[in-house]
Image: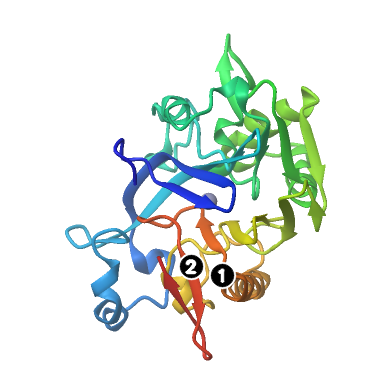
């Protein structure tokens, strides 16, 4: 963490900054993970509190964050949080947010017009929010010069659901607010993985949390990083890879993807950047022979 409280990481020639939107205790652990118990709490309490579990409220922390990756002359924004002014009547923690996210991004070294790529691990509402912003009553691209990289299987899945006759807008309306305006503006690249984006970045399918969820693999000067989105939401799932987040499109596929990505992270020694894990927000995965432990 630097003097301004921003978390900064280096991987080879790349620098990576965490751009926070929110970081709060929000979920009852038993609501997320039916396997949660007092025994689990006793066993893991020494590292859970205070960054991953709030003793006072008994709630689990969830961070909502983007990663600003700078490599060579490129500025790449990975996952786009919830965004301001987005209506989520059933999600009070993320309803009509008004955060200084763009100021934080600027402090980390990128104005909106400087972003070259926006890359979404998947198209859930908390990963596409800042794709667009409200200007004169219309949702327009926040990053006017960026190419936006979306998973085609995710796009196809939501496009079909959203365009069925009489369909309610999917993902709290964020498909129409944060994804379609990008496609309509001609700024989207819909990719089907595996796909190599450039010398440093590769897109790897890791479906299950959503139909087309992908992860981004970075290699620079022999060092590795993995931007894993929602392959796991909490470090407890590194100890217990069969624990699923309730909102998974395919629970069994999510387990298979989680184990595959944990294996890859452990064997490559990659620095792992998840979408929602608490401080210190990034770390490594160690294989123990029988399973995995987080080294965050
Ligand atoms: Zn998420």
Q: Residue at x 57, y 23 (%)?
A: 112
Q: Residue at x 77, y 41 (%)?
A: 159
Element on which disc 2 rests: strand
Residue located farthest toward the bottom when viewing the structure as drawn: 290
Image location of residue 227, percent across then percent down: 59, 55
- The label on residue 58 is none
Name the foreground residue: 296 vs 254.
296
265 vs 27, left or right, is right
Q: Quadrant of the C terminus?
A: bottom left
Name the foreground residue: 134 vs 219.
219
Image location of residue 45, percent across then percent down: 25, 73
**Vertical placement of 73 versus 233: above or below?**
above
Q: Residues within 10 Å of mark 2 (few under 14, many from 20)?
A: some
Q: Residue at x 42, y 70 (%)?
A: 295
**In the rendered structure, which disc, 1 or 2, sits on the residue that comes first in sequence?**
1
Which residue bears the numbered disc 1? Answer: 269
**Vertical placement of 129 versus 247: above or below?**
above
How far apart, in angstroms, are the residues tagged by discs 1 and 2? 7 Å
222 vs 164, left or right, is left
Element on which disc 1 rests: loop
Q: Is residue 288 visible?
A: yes
Residue located farthest toward the left when viewing the structure as drawn: 56
Image location of residue 65, percent across then percent down: 46, 44
Q: Are marks 1 and 2 in contact (CB under 8 Å)?
A: yes
- The label on residue 284 is 2
Q: Is residue 142 visible?
A: no
Q: Residues within 10 Å of mark 1 (few under 14, many from 20)?
A: some
């Amino acid at each position: 963490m630097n003097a301004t409280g921003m978390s900064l990481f280096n991987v080879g020639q790349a620098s990576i900054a965490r751009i926070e939107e929110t970081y709060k205790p929000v979920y009852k652990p038993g609501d997320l993970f039916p396997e949660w118990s007092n025994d689990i709490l006793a066993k893991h309490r020494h590292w859970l509190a205070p960054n991953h579990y709030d003793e006072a409220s008994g709630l689990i922390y969830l961070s909502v964050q983007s990663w600003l990756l700078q490599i060579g002359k490129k500025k790449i924004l990975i996952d786009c949080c919830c965004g301001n002014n987005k209506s989520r009547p059933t999600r009070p923690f993320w309803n009509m947010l008004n955060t200084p996210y763009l100021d934080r991004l600027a402090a980390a070294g990128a104005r909106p017009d400087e972003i070259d790529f926006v890359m979404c691990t998947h198209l859930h509402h908390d990963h596409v929010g800042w794709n667009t912003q409200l200007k004169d009553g219309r949702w327009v691209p926040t990053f006017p010069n960026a190419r936006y990289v979306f998973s085609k299987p995710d796009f196809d899945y939501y496009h079909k659901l959203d365009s069925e006759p009489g369909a309610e807008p999917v993902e709290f309306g964020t498909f129409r607010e944060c994804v379609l305006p990008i496609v309509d503006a001609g700024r989207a690249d819909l990719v089907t993985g595996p796909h190599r984006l450039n010398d440093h970045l590769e897109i790897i399918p890791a479906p299950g949390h959503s139909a087309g969820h992908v992860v981004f693999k970075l290699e620079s000067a022999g060092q590795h990083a993995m931007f894993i989105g929602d392959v796991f939401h909490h470090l407890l799932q590194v100890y217990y890879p069969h624990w699923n987040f309730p909102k998974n499109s395919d629970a069994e596929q999510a387990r298979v993807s989680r184990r595959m990505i944990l294996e890859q992270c452990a064997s490559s020694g990659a620095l792992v950047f998840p979408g929602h894990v608490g401080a210190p927000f990034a770390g490594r995965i160690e294989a123990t022979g029988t399973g995995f432990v987080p080294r965050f």
